Amino acid sequence: MQSDNPTAAILLIGDEILSGRTRDLNAHHLAGVLNAIGIDLREIRVVADDHAAIVAALRALDRHLGGAWDMVFSSGGIGPTHDDITADAVADAYGAALELNPDARRVMEEHWRPRGIEITESRLRMARIPRGATLIRNAVSAAPGFSIGGLHVMAGVPSVFRSMVEAIVPQLATGRPMQSATIEVLRPESEVAEDLRAVADAHPSLSLGSYPFRDDRGYGTNVVVRGLDADEVERARAALVERFGA
């Protein structure tokens, strides 16, 4: 599929995801948001809570560090405990000093004091921000995320992550939202392959995919057409309907 939209990757950080202890919800949510605002998500990567692995992933993903994509969205590892090492690794990757950010500290203390939450050294770890980064507002629990280079660092807790996504979206460079159409065909995938290829060849700027299913009606295939031009998506959809009688 041809696209001139900005590109992005999602980096999920956490041993708990790799172990299967935690089911990721953040990438699914963010993928839908990016699709809606015209940012092409090209890669999702998961790494452990390992300093070197995080640094290597950022260098591979963020174009500002010689990586592949225009922007990167990370989730996880910016909490108050010893294994929350994302900020340290990000500072290393971007060659920035990690320091106690006064604005981050002020926002958190203003949130904590009325609630009787003690200000401890562990909690203040969440105010350590790489020098030169800008803060991402957190309307749920106050502890901010931050942006540096093409990277947007956000929390792993889904409710907090969504709050940060909502805060950062207005600041992003966006493109044309993706258009899509789905046709349900009550035939197995092997029986739609040739017709699907013919329509795909006739519309090279679009992405056509097939997704098999089975229910009480038998075998079937959902055919999905995606592209930036709504008119061309509709032409391809009509061509598929003509071939399949869907």
Image: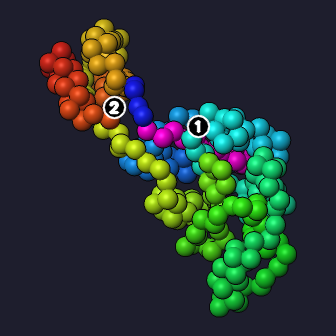
Q: Which of 239 and 214 is in front in this view?
A: 239
The x, y position of residue 18, in whole percent, is 70, 41
Q: Kindly identify the residue that appears in the image at 78 percent across and 82 percent down.
A: 119
- CA neighbours of label 1 inside 10 A, class few (<14), some (14 to 19), many (20+): many
Q: Is residue 91 left or right of residue 73?
A: right
**Residue furthest to the top:** 194
Whether residue 11 is in magenta: the answer is yes
41 or 148, nearer to the observer: 148
Q: Which residue is drawn at 34% across and 18% down?
A: 204
Q: Which segment did they paint magenta? A: 5-19
Task: Label 1: state its secondary structure.
Answer: loop
The circle on residue 226 is: 2
Apparent side of residue 148 relative to residue 71 in the rendered image (left or right): right
Disc 1 designates what residue?
A: 69
Quarter of the rendering containing residue 199: top left
In the picture, measured across the screen, residue 206 lies left or right of residue 15, that is left
Q: Where is residue 34 in the image (x, y as percent from the top left)?
A: 45, 47
How far, Cα to Cα, is label 2 from label 1?
A: 21 Å
**Residue 216 in sight in this render:** no
Callout in the foreground (2, 1): 1
Q: Is residue 213 visible?
A: yes
Q: Is residue 59 above or below residue 78?
A: above
